[in-house]
Image: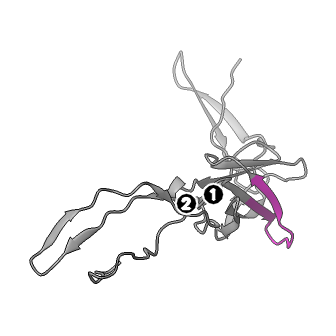
Amino acid sequence: PEVINGRTHKATVVDLSPWVEYEFRVVASNSVGIGEPSRPSALLKTKAAVPVVAPTNISGGGGSRSELVITWEPVSEELQNGEGFGYIVMFRPLGSTTWTKAVVASVESSKYVYRNESITPLSPFEVKVGVYNNEGEGTLSSISIVYSGEDEPQMAPAGASALSVSAAAVEVSWQPIPWNRHTGRVLGYEVRGW
């Protein structure tokens, strides 16, 4: 607080963070200057409150077929505002109106995997992640788009041909598989010979 007149012997300190330990010192001042600070008070923890900071960097994707992998950056301890802290993960297929909700009770968690055989490969989902503690549910992140896991490629490369370039080498070429929602991203090819 600002400077308090010399006849006052107590003050209210405001704008502190919830569920954080503080210690306090008092310093006397006059027209000559500022004296030595008092010894620190005993540690005092402020009361808990509903968390107000949502997780950031909501993303995900990857995973196996029929999986939706959701990741986020965990909320730091000083922003958890109380005991019993955890995450609320909400997601729905893009265009749907109904949210699915899951609770992740671990403070250290930064990932949630939803498995369901009805999820088609590379399906877009709207995702948001919130926080809670023993005081109640807090803020939710803004919506992010996350894609479900891919399936293995369903098409074979076309136009495979081989050209002998030396007594010990053959050059193999093919037409790449075009990307689409059903084939996913082709990360590489395997060339087999016999």
Q: Secondary structure at mark 2?
A: loop
Quadrant housing residue 91: bottom right
Q: Quadrant of residue 192?
A: top right
Could you give the CA–CA distance between mark 2 and mark 1, rounded to whole angstroms?
29 Å
Where 11 sits versus 61, above or below? below
For the point 81% across and 43% down, the residue is: 154
Query: What is the magenta segment's predominant secondary structure?
Result: strand
* Place of residue 186 in the rendered image (x, y in percent of width and height, measured from the top left): 67, 45
Image: 171 above or below 55? above
Residue 89 x/y as whole percent: 73, 58
Q: To which residue does mark 2 refer?
A: 19
Name the quadrant of the C terminus.
top right
The residue most toward the right is 118
Kind of residue sitting beneath label 1: Ser
2 vs 1, front mark: 2
**What amino acid is at disc 2?**
Trp
Front residue (pair 3, 15): 3
Q: Residue at x 48, y 58 (%)?
A: 44
**Mark 1 surroundings within 10 Å by alpha-carbon count, few (fewer than 14), some (14 through 19), many (20 or more):** some
Mark 2, other Cα within 10 Å: few <14 / some 14–19 / many ≥20: some
Left or right: 4 as drawn, with respect to 112: left
Membership of 101 in magenta stretch: yes
The residue shown at (54%, 61%) is 79
Q: In the rendered structure, which segment of residues is drawn in magenta? A: 89-103
In the figure, is residue 174 to the left or right of 16?
right
Disc 1 marks which residue? 59
Q: Quadrant of the N terminus?
A: bottom left
Q: Is residue 3 left or right of residue 141?
A: left
